[in-house]
Amino acid sequence: MRRRTERFDTAAGGLVRASALALGLLAGMPAAGAAEAACEFRGWSKDPDPAGLNLHATPARTAAVVGRLPAPRRDGDETFAVEVRVVAGRDGWLLVDRAEFADYGSAPAKTVFTGRGWVSGRMVGVSVQDERVRRQPDAAAAIVDRPRAPEGGEAEILRLDRIVACRGRWIEVEGSFGEAGGVAARGAGRPTRGWVTGLCGNQVTTCP
């Protein structure tokens, strides 16, 4: 099976519960910016920090912290990130309502967060199985970019740097196209931005 995520050399954290989120979410949203858009997809935390990834009451770095996603956990020679369910997006932030470690390898599944908390779109990873980049989140929308296959070479792959927005099963991304070994560093490859679908939150294989 094809591995779908980066490796981390950090340990996992414990169970996090957001018990007072209603008050936190009512503390006030940013006055300016796009309206919250509903979406639904699964991804994983890209943050390797041993301290974990903060979840905020509103889509802002200065907002109250309502929970924390643990760092990736080791399972033998493998390392797996905590997976999240995203239900909305706003201003480059994503609203998570559940997080868990999947039962990859020998480690059991474990829920680590239930509630509502916002994370930066830079900190959530997801595999994109349909790498045609479109102008709008619609299968009929114009394709503005796609992987290129040089003669005698392998087709480019899409690397995501940031999830800008989401709508339904679509995400707007900033990233780059390049050879498999040429997009490991941020900014490498051919820059691209637009809407993609065919999202897969499985870290070890492809999705149906």
Image (tube, helix red, strand yellow):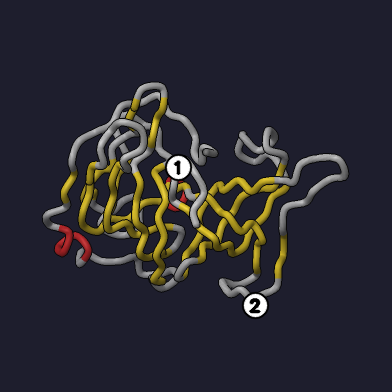
In the image, farthest residue toward the bottom: 140
How many numbered callouts?
A: 2
* 60 sits left or right of 138 in the view: left
Query: Mark number for residue 4?
Result: none
Q: What residue type is labelled 1?
A: Gln
Which residue matches tag 2? 140
Which residue matches tag 1? 203
In the image, farthest residue toward the right: 151
Provide residue 90's location: percent of width, then percent of height. 41, 65
Provide residue 17's location: percent of width, then percent of height. 16, 49
Q: In percent of the image, x 71 and y 43: which residue is there?
A: 178
User: Residue 48 versus residue 31: which sits nearer the camera?
Assistant: 48
User: Residue 119 versus residue 58: which sits nearer the camera?
Assistant: 119
Provide residue 87's location: percent of width, then percent of height. 35, 64
Mark 2 and mark 1: span between their CA atoms? 29 Å
When asked about the image quadrant of residue 13, the answer is top left
Q: Nearer the viewer, mark 2 or mark 1?
A: 1
* Badge 2 element: loop
53 in relation to 171, above or below? above
* 153 sits left or right of 206 in the view: right
Q: In percent of the image, x 64 and y 56: which residue is there?
A: 131
94 in relation to 65, above or below? below
* Badge 1 element: loop
Q: Residues within 10 Å of mark 2 (few under 14, many from 20)?
A: few
In the image, farthest residue toward the left: 19
Q: What residue type is labelled 2?
A: Ala
Q: In percent of the image, x 25 and y 66: which residue is there?
A: 28
